[in-house]
Amino acid sequence: MTSPLQQKLKITGPTVITANRLTDGVVVWLKADGGWSAGLADAAVVNTSDDALKLLGVANADENRAVGAYPARVEIAADGTPRPVNLRERIRVGGPTIALPGAA
């Protein structure tokens, strides 16, 4: 029997797993070794729902370091690095869209 998550998760291209670091809220990306990185270039990229579910399992088992894990679509640039596809992920990678108080 297929779980409801497996029925809903449809991967249509390169995908990474992202979350927020528990200690400070920084956006992090799941690496192939199961660790987390603040750099998208270090993220493990998968192309199937099964592989994404495996990575989500790893991510969700590590909620002492990162929370709110979910799959995010990426495109692979000419230099081989992943780049965010949608606006939400571009903002998460690039930081706030407004100047924060105290920022120079």
Image (cartoon, rainbow, N blue to C red):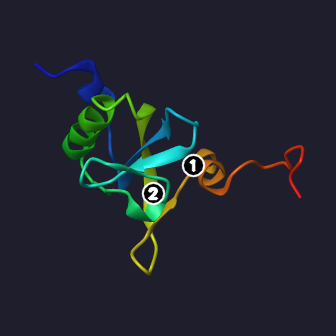
- Left or right position of 58 against 63: left
Disc 2 residue crowd, few under 14, some 14–19, many 20+, Cα 10 Å: many
- In the rendered image, the quadrant that contains the C terminus is bottom right
Label 1 sits on a secondary structure element that is: helix
Give the camera-side residue of 44 and 52.
44
Which residue ends up furthest to the left in the rendered image?
Answer: 1
Q: Quadrant of residue 32?
A: bottom left
Give the camera-side residue of 3 and 79.
79
Q: Please name the residue shown 37% across and 52% down the image.
A: 15
Q: Please name the residue shown 27% across and 54% down the image.
A: 47
Give the camera-side residue of 63 and 6.
63
Q: Horizontal and vertical percent for residue 68? A: 46, 29
Which residue ends up furthest to the bottom in the rendered image?
Answer: 79
Q: Quadrant of residue 62?
A: top left
Label 2 sits on a secondary structure element that is: strand
The three-letter amino acid code for the residue at tag 2 is Val
How far apart, in angstroms, are the residues tagged by discs 2 and 1?
9 Å
- Tag 1 residue: 89
Which numbered disc, 2 or 1, marks the residue that appears first in the sequence? 2
Q: Horizontal and vertical percent for residue 41? A: 44, 65
The three-letter amino acid code for the residue at tag 1 is Glu
| Residues at circles 2 and 1 in contact by the CB criterion of under 8 Å | yes
- Left or right position of 73 against 59: right
Residue 2 drawn above or below residue 31: above
Q: Which mark is residue 74?
A: 2
